[in-house]
């Protein structure tokens, strides 16, 4: 006995096609959520980047605080005499008459 050929119903075929298309769309969305640039696998990379940026930010904040302190010490109305003397000696290459200069050797 030969098997009877089953006629395909167009509505049934359309329903299967819609189901398959929906499944493919869901698989694409899931793979993008997992592998995409903002996906789950990218979180580890983002966390390491945030840690690096946090360290860099802490270093820059420390430098900023040091520069603010130096600015405060060089305030025009209330200059720190020690810092002013240090800068004068360094930039103008001058010494007071009662000072002794001891040259240091460079270890090159």
Image (tube, rainbow, N blue to C red):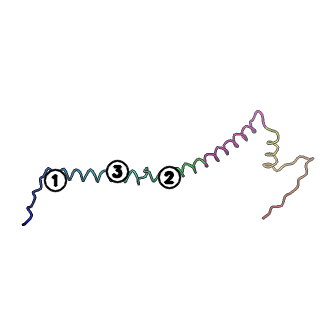
Q: Which one is closest to the eye, mark 1 or mark 3?
A: 1
Q: As rendered, which of 107 and 77 lies closer to the eye?
A: 107
Q: Which residue is mark 1?
A: 13
Q: Quadrant of the C terminus?
A: bottom right
Q: Which one is closest to the eye, mark 1 or mark 2?
A: 1
Distance from disc 1 to disc 2, alpha carbons, whole Å, reads 44 Å
Residue 75 screen position, x and y as percent: 74, 36
Callout 1: helix, strand or loop?
helix
Residue in the image at 34% along x and 50% along y: 29
Distance from disc 3 to disc 2, alpha carbons, whole Å, reads 20 Å
Q: Residue furthest top?
A: 77
Residue in the image at 57% along x and 49% along y: 51
Q: Which residue is mark 3?
A: 29
Q: As rendered, which of 69 and 4 lies closer to the eye?
A: 4
Do residues under tags 3 and 2 come within 8 Å of each other at their CB atoms? no
Say which quarter of the image contains residue 79: top right
Tell me: 48 left or right of 26: right
Q: Is residue 71 magenta?
A: yes
Do residues under tags 1 and 3 come within 8 Å of each other at their CB atoms? no
Residue 37 screen position, x and y as percent: 43, 52
- In the picture, the disc for residue 24 is none
Report the magenta stretch's main SS.
helix
Tell me: 93 left or right of 37: right
Q: Which residue is mark 2?
A: 44
Residue in the image at 82% along x and 41% along y: 82
Residue 24 screen position, x and y as percent: 29, 54
Residue span colored magenta: 55-79
N-terminal of the pair, mark 1 or mark 3, is: 1
């Amino acid at each position: 006995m030969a098997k009877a050929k089953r006629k395909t119903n167009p509505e049934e075929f359309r329903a299967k096609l819609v189901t398959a298309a929906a499944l493919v769309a869901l698989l694409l969305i899931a793979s993008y959520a997992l592998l995409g640039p903002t996906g789950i696998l990218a979180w580890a990379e983002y966390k390491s980047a945030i840690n690096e940026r946090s360290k860099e930010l802490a270093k820059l904040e420390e430098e900023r605080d040091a520069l603010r302190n130096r600015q405060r010490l060089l305030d025009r109305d209330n200059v720190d005499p020690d810092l002013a003397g240090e800068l004068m000696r360094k930039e103008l290459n001058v010494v007071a008459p009662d000072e002794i200069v001891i040259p240091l050797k460079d270890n090159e």
